[in-house]
Image (cartoon, rainbow, N blue to C red):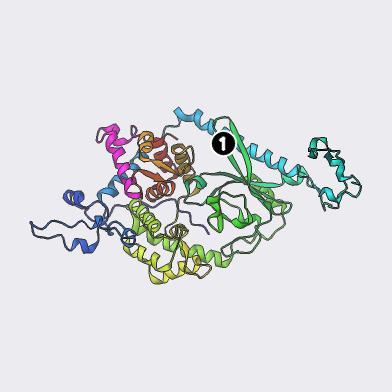
Amino acid sequence: MDLEIKGVAATPRGQDVLSSAKKKSFQGWRSKSQASHEHRPVDVPSLDLGRLGDSDDEKAQPEDGGDADLTALDKKALMQQCYTSKPYSMEHSKRKLEAEDLAAERRKQAVVEQVMIDQLSRAVISDPEQNTNAGNNQAGYRLQGFGTTPLRFRKRTLHDTKIRTSSALTENLLSNKLRFDARIISRNGRDACRELIGFFFGYDQSLTIYEYRQFGRNRTNTLPFIKKGIYRHQRGRRKGKLYELRDFYVGANLTFSTCDHPNLADSVKQNSLLTIRIMDIDDKALDSLKSTLVENQQGLTRQELDDRSTFTAVQNVMKEKLNQRGVRTLTRLGKFFRQQDKKGDGYLCKSEFYQALKYFHLELAEKDFESVWVILDENCNDQVDYGEFTRAIIGEMNEYRKAFIRKVYMKLDPNKTGSVSMTDITIFYCARKHPQVLSGAATEEDIKSALLETLADACSNPNEVSYCEFEDYYEGLSLGILDDEDFVNILRNSWGV
């Protein structure tokens, strides 16, 4: 399913925003019931309901209600979009970009070489007990008075094997492959920032995925992440069908059962399914494989096309509702879902999604909501991953933009702990090139404090930012930016990537 959207035109509303007095009193959204009780006697103090949330049920509720008008918090978030009016200068960083591209190509080449070595060096090793000519007395493996003889002192000979291979694997066969870059779709920052490089082999329709890991400046390691094998779709309209060449394109999802891969990290094995998103692909190798492989290239099925049409129609409705309040909506919606997720498995029920959309003024027509739910609730168990639900109804950034988000976060979190302190955010964020700073309309501290305030509002812990919270922030900011390069300029100017 293609859920990618590049952005939404930030068209101003024709309504006046809150007055300055109301901005100071109400930051964020406020419920209609609260607005109806604004008039009270002077001698009666106001009741701050936000401080009374002690029980779990109360904590699970959004912090304040939904108001369709722009708030002070919305305006502070939109200040970050101003960077697009000053294009990023490529001259001073040309060498840096070339060096990064060269380093990335070297990483990919190192993985390719490791894959070839791993596959070509595999030998069939049989059990030594199959050796019919062993005839060695077990006593010969013992030194008198010393028990079992060490291996280096034993007499070792080649033995016959009963295992025979059906075909030989050659370098020519392995070279007929498709290489792609991938990432894990995860709310865990450590897993989401793993560098994965996958291969689909044309000679047997198998695939494998490797992880490139770097320890410090000079030490690197390339390890198998998904062992080489022939795999099937674990979900979606093609569940149970083998992966084919047509399943590999930028934005495609590959799903695997975690129980089939015991060597995966514990954080990955917490879920029964592992979803990997293809970020980039070798187009030249893809075209070559399409011309040599004989397979049914029918493309998407009728059902898959209908699913895409349903998601596109719903996302278009959401574009109008979000308008310029995308940052506030997505960050608080994600925060609300995480609070509702008592089990910590990432799944919520139908009624919880329906109530959340209603509270955040993102209501869908009942027919549209039911259509989306039928597609997502494949197992008919009234449980859907809330990240997948959000991507389905709102869409998400394309992989080009996502790559820069991950790049920024890895810079902030080099040890891949999954969270970044607000102190580090303050240190690394740069507002010197912001147009309002250059014009004298605002100071660097004004721009920086606006960012910190909107991030703090999005975070469960005001002292640190998790990967999913950081991604939600820029996902909302991305909605109002049509051009990819404008969005990338914001990240380059702000974080120096």
Q: Residue at x 31, y 36 (%)?
A: 435
Say what amino acid the circle numbered 1 marks.
Gln
Residue 402 in the image: x percent, y percent?
47, 46
Left or right, 51 with respect to 352, comes to left
Q: Is residue 368 magenta?
A: no
- The residue beneath circle 1 is 214
Q: Give the structural element (helix, strand or loop) at label 1.
A: strand
Residue 257 in view in this figure: no
Mark 1 packing: few (<14 Cα in 10 Å), some, or many (20+)?
Answer: few
Left or right, 397 with respect to 52, comes to right
In the image, residue 98 sits, relative to residue 54, either above or below, namely: above
Left or right, 364 with respect to 241, comes to left
Q: Is residue 432 magenta?
A: yes
Residue 151 in view in this figure: yes
Residue 153 in the image: x percent, y percent?
82, 35
Residue 396 in the image: x percent, y percent?
45, 53
Q: Which residues are magenta?
A: 430-459
Q: Residue at x 62, y 52 (%)?
A: 262
Q: Quadrant of residue 238?
A: bottom right
User: In terms of secondary structure, what is the magenta stretch mainly?
Assistant: helix
Residue placed furthest toward the front: 145
Quarter of the picture holding the C terminus: top left
